[in-house]
Amino acid sequence: MADDEAALKANFVEVFTGLGNLWRCLFKRSIIMEAGLRMDTRFRYCEDQVFIYQYFQHIHSAVCIDYQGYVYFMTPDSATHDYRRIPEYDLVSTLESEWANVESRYVEPAQREAERKEWIYYELYLKMLMYALKGYLPGAAVERKERLRRWKLIRHDAWFQSLYSAKFWKPRPVRMAGFVCKYGLYPLADPVLWYLGKKNKLKLTLCKPEILPVLIE
C-alpha cells in the first residue's frame, strides 16, 4: 500500500483511518523497541488506539492484505458493553494530541479537515459526549457540580468546536447531546438527564461504530 513516506502521505486515509485495534495489525518489533513504545496503563479502554497512533509516527511503510485471520465475537458482558469503562477526558486529550502528531507528519494543513472527517472526528465526538453522559449512569454517577464541569470542559475543547460544525454522520442522540453542549444548555438539561439515568433510561455502550454507540430511550 505504501513503501515510502511519500506513499504514506498519498494514501493516508487508506493506511491510517479505522485502525484503532491491535488485532487488525501486525507490528514491526524493532520499531516498538527503538521508539520505546508501551501501552499507557492509565487507560482501561482504547489503550490500543493510543498505542497505534504513537506507532504510526515511526513507520516508513504499510501493507494491507485481504486475509481475515481473526474472528471478533461480541458478547453482552464484554468490556465494550461496560459503560463504566467509558473514557475519561484524559483519554480524549491524549488521542487529540497523538492524532495531531500523526497529522503533522503525514497530512498537509489544507487537507486535514477532509482527512479528519474520514475517522477521527467521529471517534472523538462520541468519546467526548459519552464522557459527559457517563456521569448520569448508575455506578458511574457524579454530583451535579462535576457533571456540569464535564460539559463545560467539552464545550471549550478546541476540537469540539470543529467537531460540532463538521459535516460527518452523527446518530440522532449524539446530535442532541452535541447541541446541548454547544449552546450551553446543560444546566437546563441536567435534571432531565439525571432522571433518565436514575430510571435506567439513559443507555450507553462502547460497541463498535457499526452498532449504535449511544442510545437514549
Image: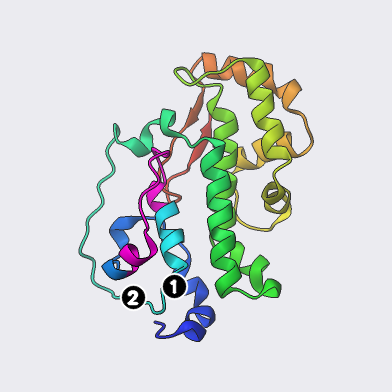
Q: Disc 1 vs disc 2: Cβ atoms closer than 8 Å?
A: yes
Can residue 132 be found in the magenta stretch?
Answer: no
Residue 44 sits above or below residue 186 on the image: below
Residue at left 60%, top 41%?
174
Which percent across, then down, holds residue 22? 32, 56
Local secondary structure at mark 2: loop
Residue ID for mark 2 = 64
Q: Nearer the viewer, residue 46 or 81?
A: 46
Can residue 34 be found in the magenta stretch?
Answer: yes
Q: Amino acid at mark 2?
A: Cys
Residue at left 41%, top 59%?
52
Residue 1 relative to residue 105: left or right: left
Q: Quadrant of the N terminus?
A: bottom left
- Which callout, 1 or 2, points at the residue further toward the start of the chain? 1
Dot 1 surroundings within 10 Å: few (below 14), some, or many (20 or more)?
A: some
Residue 54 relative to residue 143: left or right: left
Task: Tell me, for residue 15, which label it has, or none.
Answer: 1
Segment tinted magenta in the rendering = 31-49
Residue at left 59%, top 61%?
100
Dot 2 surroundings within 10 Å: few (below 14), some, or many (20 or more)?
A: few
Residue at left 66%, top 73%?
111
Q: Nearer the viewer, residue 18 or 53?
A: 53
Which percent across, then down, holds residue 43? 42, 39
